[in-house]
Amino acid sequence: MSAPFMSLYRCCQRSALLVVSRRSLSSSSVSPPPLHTRILLYLTQRFYDVEMLQSWMSLRRWKGVQKRNSFYGYAQQQYGSDIAAAYYILNMKGGFRFVGQSDWFSADRRGKFNWAFMDHKNTPLEEVNMNYTGINYRGLENLEGQKTLRTLSLRGCPEVDDWFLARLHMFQDSLEELDISHCPRITTGGLAALRNLKGLKRLDVSSLPEISSPGVVIILLEEMLPKCDVTANGYDHNLREES
Amino acid sequence: MSTWRGLHVNLRKAHGLFTVSSRHTWKYGHLTLCKSLSTGRALRNDFFKDLEAQLAAARQKALDALPGSGWSPVEMNRGLPPERTDVVIVGGGVIGWSVAYWIKQKEKRRGGVNVVVVEKDPTYSQASTVLSAGGIRQQFSLPENICLSLASAEFMKNINEHLHVLNEDPVDLQFNQSGYLFLANEEVAHIMEENYKTQRTAGAKVSLLSATQLKEKFPWINTEGVALASYGLENEGWFDPWTLLQAFKRKALSMGVVQCLGEVTDFKYTSNIARNAQGDQVAQRRVRSVKVQVSNSLEFQPIECALVVNAAGAFSGTVAAMLGIPLPVEPRKRYIYVVNCPDGPGLDTPFLIDYSGVWFRREGLGGNYIAGTSPEEALEPDTSNLEVDHQFFEEKVWPHLASRVPALEKLKVTSSWAGFYDYNTFDQNGIIGLHPLINNMFFATGFSGHGLQHSPAVGRAVAELIMEGDFTSLNLSNLGFRRILQQEPMLERNIV
Ligand SMILES: Cc1cc2nc3c(=O)[nH]c(=O)nc-3n(C[C@H](O)[C@H](O)[C@H](O)COP(=O)(O)OP(=O)(O)OC[C@H]3O[C@@H](n4cnc5c(N)ncnc54)[C@H](O)[C@@H]3O)c2cc1C
């Protein structure tokens, strides 16, 4: 009874070797192997599928993020860049305030929002709140035309990275307040890009987990932005408090 | 299989290539497989013999598992390269591994194309990649170079989508978003303006600064003599070259690329005499196999292959010479000095390039900087070794540096190193594509100091040529070999 098993076992081993050597199918003239061999080959190849499934899922996740952050070209053509920017923000479950108005438009937890913002054609935005949203550098393109944006809040955004910060130069003439606290992907290399925001008055860089030596970095940051009030809480070695 | 065949035909159509197939190995595996499955009766007779053999094997295994035995669960690679493959890549620098990755990425079926990367020095002690300054910029004068940089920056933004290997740490390039700052004097200001226009048209985010604006932005720069400055706002900075190289390598290996440690010393090729338009005879060559001298051994192994990619960096001229082909790429030694100056400029320090040719950038946060310059053509140092000339710093780098950035006057040189530019003596630009006279050797070399930053896009371009027969994403045909044969240089003005 064990003999057929053994041969099956050896066969499995061999076909696994075959797959590993990755040459099995590269010939075009040999006739197709018998059915049972093909089944075995198929089974051994199954082992890769877990791996494939995982990479496929992460790719899908990434594609989803990219898609949600795509450029709202149609809205921009139809209603102008301000409405397109507002629409993008609400779709991302963020909030904003138009120039010269006091009330905010924001999406609720389930992503529902008030369409009344459509009445404010050609009114630029002044404050934008994207806390805990999936905005990334690609989505920033939708806000490119906002020359009067004063406050931008990006607390706890998982997709905000160094490349995102480098792109903030588009608001260099107007931006006064920036909150990038709790963003898990920001590193020191990205903070260097904030040098372009020369009008910055308030900056929150609290609890950035990827910053390796926060004490030095924050001193350097203050040196780089002398007119800016830098808030940095949530670091163990907070030199600012010691001094 | 049909995809393979499709590829096979495709390639044949495109170049008349791919004569090697791995039929031999397959046949072997196939035959033995059939035997073991179809001979049930004979096996029953052999049962006791088999059992004995299995028991002996089990005993051996138990012995092997004891501590002190040399056995390992992974089959040992005896270091010999395979006897035949589809593509051989000469040179395992960042370009070589990038090409390998992109070929694998573009194959239609897993394992469809066999790729071997031949690298002579696994420590990379002389490879330009790890000895470079690691900068990336869009401030070039040729649209091709600007587009290559933009595409590479896009790649680096999403590097983990491309190069992440499952169950391993994500890639962290340690990218510094610090930008490049080029300074121009009266004489060259108009060139800078032209370049600026080209760069903006190509989509690069660059801005021009007058001397006053420059002073305002970077108070620590002495603007004497500066007429204009151009400053990169996005996608420019520097990163860790070693991480990029390792990331490409790790991903390519995980996709089935074979690494082979050894030096390519010769090629076996066949020649055909053809006539060109003028009626002159020219020899058309075709590489049949690559001879590899295996590292730390006297063994030679020929690798039969259908295609060769020459990505040997500064030494690609030597590799081409093995086929009797002149390639205007030679090593040129460049020094990098690490200096320390606690009072130097801070976090906002860009990669600064003065019109005198002297450059410097920040290195880490502790008041360290790296600096260098290219020597004049007539004073090129000897390239037989990688020794550093300290006199060169005193005479050629420091005076310019100290006058441009007065804060750096009191600097201390703490260390230094030298590396080889893969210098294209013809026009200081990359050579990408097939050689007209060798119809299966692709070149990806001659980048003269900007090969690292272009490696992702160049690898993709070469893989497109190989797998699809033409450039599909970026048209780089102007950077092909033809310009050299026709003596039409594509000069790049911003060579550092
Ligand atoms: C000082 C310095 C600063 C630089 N700064 C920058 C910068 O800021 N930005 C930028 O983009 N670029 C920069 N560069 C340029 C960049 O490093 C190169 O253009 C790039 O690394 C070239 O990569 P490569 O893979 O072609 O060459 P390499 O990294 O040199 O790799 C070639 C490999 O081929 C191997 N090899 C050679 N001959 C054989 C053979 N016969 N058989 C087997 N293997 C062989 C070698 O061992 C080597 O490992 C700089 C270079 C230097 C020297």
Image (cartoon, rainbow, N blue to C red):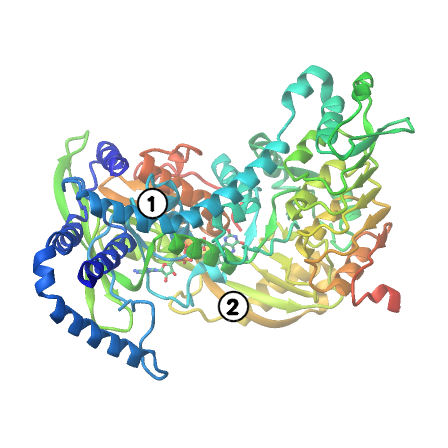
The foreground one among A98 and B369 is: A98
Given the image, on which type of amino acid does mark 2 rest?
A: Trp
Tell me, yes or no, if residue B247 can be seen here.
Answer: yes
Residue highlighted by disc 1: B110
Residue at mark 2: C-beta within 8 A of ligand 1: yes
The foreground one among B214 and B123 is: B123
Q: Distance between the Cα atoms at labels 2 and 1?
A: 41 Å
In terms of image quadrants, where is residue B383? bottom left
Residue highlighted by disc 2: B417
Quadrant location, ligand no. 1: bottom left
Q: Residue at x 90, y 26 (%)?
A: A101
Task: Please identify the quadrant where the N terminus of chain B is shown.
Answer: top left
- Which residue extends farthest bottom? B68
Q: Of the numbered discs in the image, which one, if any, rests on residue B74?
A: none
Task: For mark 2, name the chain.
Answer: B
Looking at the picture, does residue A108 appear above or below residue A163? above
- Label 1: how many Cα within 10 Å (few below 14, some 14–19, many 20+): some
Looking at the picture, does residue A70 appear above or below residue B253? above
Do the residues indicated by labels 2 and 1 lie within the same chain of the protein? Answer: yes
Q: Is residue B418 left or right of residue B289?
A: right
What secondary structure is found at the residue carrying circle 1? loop
Residue B484 x %, y %: 33, 41
Residue B8 x %, y %: 23, 37
